[in-house]
């Protein structure tokens, strides 16, 4: 919930956070900003001249992958709401309203309508109770036999795997779940809203939505059961039935088995088409497998994946439809800056079948041989031109060089340079020189931006945002690392909220750090948890920009694991101690001086 103003508590305007998230979801940041600023594509981002300070070369950057913008010149940044606040000189709520109108979303004005909404917590509790019901049915010798035969017989899943994923069975009945849930105090309205029940057109009464299906609970990274997928056991249609979006769940923003995979994917993640593929992979030791929830991958899901890993191996069905879907997934994933590969399986239609036929070791080998995104993109570029013609050939080479220059590793670049050289028949040297030229130009641009930024902070213009930072740059750097990690990863916020990691506002050194930390933790403890888009209410666009920068610099690093987080927290605490010891030391020193002066005076008189 969002209040118009903390002081106007008698007349508070409430915008449900689901609505805020929906508005953000439907307001493409590049499109909104593009209507104010002339944006040009630069790799996966966009650049333009900053509308907030005067400049001749563009330092204003829009990052579609993180739905954010940042100006390297003046330090303003944030999300789409922050941009509209700053550009139109509005407060946060008015900026939200402006974008709502633009996106065609009505904000509920009735104060009660928001409170009558079913809370996410209630949906999660309800789903957990339903999951227990489905599990009990699966283990019921009479009711669940057909389901158990399917899972352990046909699919050859072990009991441990069935338990691990909390699989269940929805009996072939129109009312068993409904009756059971009534007994636990859930209303018809709640059951229908949570998509556990449908509503009979004839009688208007609820009936069990999932019938005669294997039930897959979908669990978010905080361990809540947010929805269900139900699969038939034969060839009847639809093969999968999924919960529709509910207050606690959006299909486009969640992934199946991410709750497990997130702990095993620092190197790479495997993206599958179906739940059964994911389960088979996990059972075979590939615990980094996830699947989308019955839809093609969305950019939202790609962004979520990019928070946990840098590389994704797409492992879709080997038929034509699967390969088409893989192509599409590849570009969605590449757009958020991920290293994408595509698995090519011969002799099996999907990963589940492949592992059953050839075993996990062969599958691991196939993963190693997966095709890089580069090969795919090269094919796309070459398809546009007829390289027999000299002009076309030159254009193709220019595009390929620019593509190669996007890869940060020089080893990778060298490999691709040879690939292109042998493919088009141009010398490696020539291509390497062109790539080098592009890189030099780009790094010069970056250095210019950085020095502009540094100059401004020396003049005291740049760091009006966090004036305390200059007093102890080292402590500030540690603070920014901690906050950056916490802004990016739910699990670190959770660890601090549950006090499994001890960190409090007092540990922070700068006023800004303290404020960011305490607001973040406040939101974390609310019903829907933390969301960057809700921070705009209490921070200026300049401060939002600073947060963007903290998050952005963590994203550039591969080492964002628990060790890093813990050691940063330790470092901050010991820095705090060092500073307070030093302050104590100075105080003692002054005391000694004064005592000596007093002594001297006394001896003189
Ligand atoms: Zn600027």
Image (spheres, helix red, strand yellow):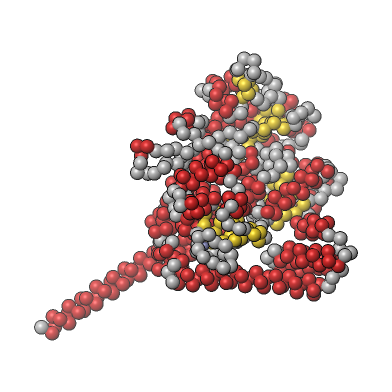
**Quadrant housing residue 217:** top right
Location of the C terminus by quadrant is: bottom left
**Quadrant housing residue 6:** top left
Residue at 65% in and 69% down = 442
Residue at 61% in and 38% down = 250
Residue at 38% in and 56% down = 506
- Is 238 in front, or is 309? 238
Say if residue 355 shows up in the picture. Answer: no
Direction left: furthest residue = 605
- Is 150 in front, or is 203? 203
Horizontal side of 427 relative to 543 (left or right) equals right
Direction right: furthest residue = 388
Q: Position of residue 280 (x, y in %)?
A: 74, 41
Horizontal side of 74 relative to 379 (left or right) equals left
Say if residue 401 shows up in the picture. Answer: yes
Q: Relative to 72, say whether 362 is above or below.
A: above
Q: Relative to 596, say whether 514 is above or below.
A: above
Q: Position of residue 450 (x, y in %)?
A: 55, 69
Q: Position of residue 512 (x, y in %)?
A: 42, 58
């Amino acid at each position: 919930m969002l209040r118009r103003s903390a002081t106007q508590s008698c007349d508070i305007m409430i915008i449900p956070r689901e609505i805020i998230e929906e508005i953000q979801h439907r307001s493409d940041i590049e499109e909104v900003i593009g209507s104010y600023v002339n944006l040009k594509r630069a790799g996966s981002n966009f650049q333009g001249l900053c509308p907030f300070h005067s400049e001749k070369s563009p330092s204003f950057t829009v990052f579609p992958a993180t739905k954010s913008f940042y100006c390297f010149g003046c330090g303003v940044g944030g999300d789409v709401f922050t941009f509209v606040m700053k550009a139109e000189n509005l407060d946060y709520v008015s900026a939200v309203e402006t974008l709502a109108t633009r996106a065609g979303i009505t904000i509920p004005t009735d104060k009660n309508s928001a409170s009558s909404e079913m809370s996410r917590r209630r949906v999660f509790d309800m789903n957990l109770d339903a999951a227990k019901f489905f599990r009990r049915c699966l283990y019921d010798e009479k009711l669940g036999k057909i389901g158990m035969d399917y899972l352990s017989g046909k699919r050859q899943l072990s009991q441990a795997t069935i338990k691990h994923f909390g699989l269940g069975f929805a009996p072939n009945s129109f009312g068993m779940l409904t009756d059971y849930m009534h007994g636990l105090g859930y209303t018809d309205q709640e059951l229908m809203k949570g998509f556990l029940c449908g509503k009979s057109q004839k009688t208007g009464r609820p009936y069990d939505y999932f019938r005669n299906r294997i039930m897959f609970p979908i669990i978010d990274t905080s361990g809540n059961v947010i929805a269900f997928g139900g699969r038939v056991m034969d060839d009847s249609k639809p093969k999968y039935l999924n919960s529709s979006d509910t207050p606690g769940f959006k299909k486009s923003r969640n992934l199946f088995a991410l709750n497990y995979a997130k702990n095993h994917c620092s190197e790479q993640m495997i993206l599958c088409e179906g739940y059964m593929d994911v389960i088979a992979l996990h059972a075979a030791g590939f615990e980094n497998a996830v699947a989308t929830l019955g839809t093609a991958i969305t950019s939202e899901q790609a962004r979520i994946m990019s928070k946990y890993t840098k590389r994704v191996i797409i492992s879709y069905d080997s038929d034509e439809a699967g390969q088409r879907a893989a192509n599409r997934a590849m570009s969605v994933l590449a757009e958020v800056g991920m290293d994408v590969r595509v698995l090519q399986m011969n002799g099996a239609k999907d990963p589940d079948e492949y592992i059953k036929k050839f075993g996990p070791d062969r599958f691991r080998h196939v993963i190693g041989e997966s095709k890089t995104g580069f090969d795919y993109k090269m094919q796309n570029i070459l398809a546009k031109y007829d390289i027999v013609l000299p002009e076309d050939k030159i254009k193709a080479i220019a595009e390929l060089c620019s593509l190669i220059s996007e890869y940060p590793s020089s080893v990778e670049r060298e490999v691709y340079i040879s690939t292109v050289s042998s493919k088009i028949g141009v010398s490696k040297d020539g291509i390497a020189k062109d790539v080098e030229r592009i890189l030099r130009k780009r790094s010069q641009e970056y250095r210019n931006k950085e020095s502009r930024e540094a100059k401004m902070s020396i003049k005291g213009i740049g760091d009006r945002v966090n004036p305390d930072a200059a007093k102890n740059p080292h402590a500030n750097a540690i603070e920014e690392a901690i906050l950056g990690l916490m802004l990016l990863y739910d699990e670190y916020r959770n660890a601090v909220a549950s006090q499994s990691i001890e960190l409090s506002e007092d540990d922070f050194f700068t006023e800004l750090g303290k404020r960011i930390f305490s607001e973040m933790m406040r939101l974390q403890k609310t019903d829907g948890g933390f969301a960057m888009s809700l921070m705009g209410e209490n921070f200026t666009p300049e401060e939002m920009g600073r947060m963007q920068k903290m998050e952005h610099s963590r994203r550039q690093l591969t080492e964002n694991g628990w060790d890093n987080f813990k050691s940063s927290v330790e470092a901050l605490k010991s820095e705090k101690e060092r500073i307070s010891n030093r302050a104590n030391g100075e105080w003692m020193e002054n005391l000694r001086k004064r005592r000596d002066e007093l002594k001297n005076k006394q001896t003189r008189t």
